[in-house]
Amino acid sequence: MGDWLVQRTDTEWVLSLYIQPNAKKTEFCGLHGGAMKVRLAAPPVDGKANSALLFFIARFCGVGRNRVELISGETSRSKRVALREPGAEALRRLQVLPG
């Protein structure tokens, strides 16, 4: 796994992400420095981009939204997201991302 995905505890992983809001579609699109770049179709106003990001990560990983939390970067393009108890399938999906 890349530097962007780090195991923090036995049951929690942290994703380092770089966000591009107002994109045509929401998708992972490769590495940006040491972070995984995510294009978001949501605008960066009133927390809409953050909510869309967390929903996208949860859906992509196949976990409940309550297991995904923004831990830093609320108003920044550089964000850190905690993924709790992701399971083997979620980690496999993250491992095959471009970059």
Image (tube, helix red, strand yellow):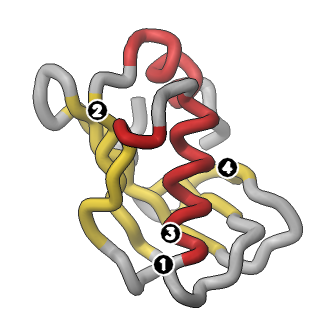
- Residue 46 in the image, given as x and y percentages of width and height: 53, 87
| Residue plotted at (38% across, 67% down) | 79
Per the image, the residue denoted by label 4 is 28
Per the image, the residue denoted by label 1 is 77
The disc, 3 or 2, on the residue closer to the chain's N-terminal end is 3
Single out the residue that lies furthest toward the left: 9
For residue 84, which numbered disc appears in the image?
2
Q: CA distance from mark 3 to mark 2?
A: 17 Å
Single out the residue that lies furthest toward the right: 24
Q: CA distance from mark 2 to mark 4?
A: 20 Å
Quarter in which the N terminus is drawn: top left
Closer mark to the observer between disc 3 and disc 4: 3
Numbered disc 3: secondary structure? helix
- Residue 2 in the image, given as x and y percentages of width and height: 41, 38
Numbered disc 2: secondary structure? strand
Numbered disc 1: secondary structure? loop
Quarter in which the C terminus is drawn: top right
**12, above or below 45, in the image:** above
Q: CA distance from mark 3 to mark 4?
A: 15 Å
The disc, 3 or 4, on the residue closer to the chain's N-terminal end is 4
Per the image, the residue denoted by label 3 is 50
The three-letter amino acid code for the residue at tag 1 is Arg
Q: CA distance from mark 2 to mark 1?
A: 22 Å
Q: As drawn, is 26 to the left or to the right of 89?
A: right
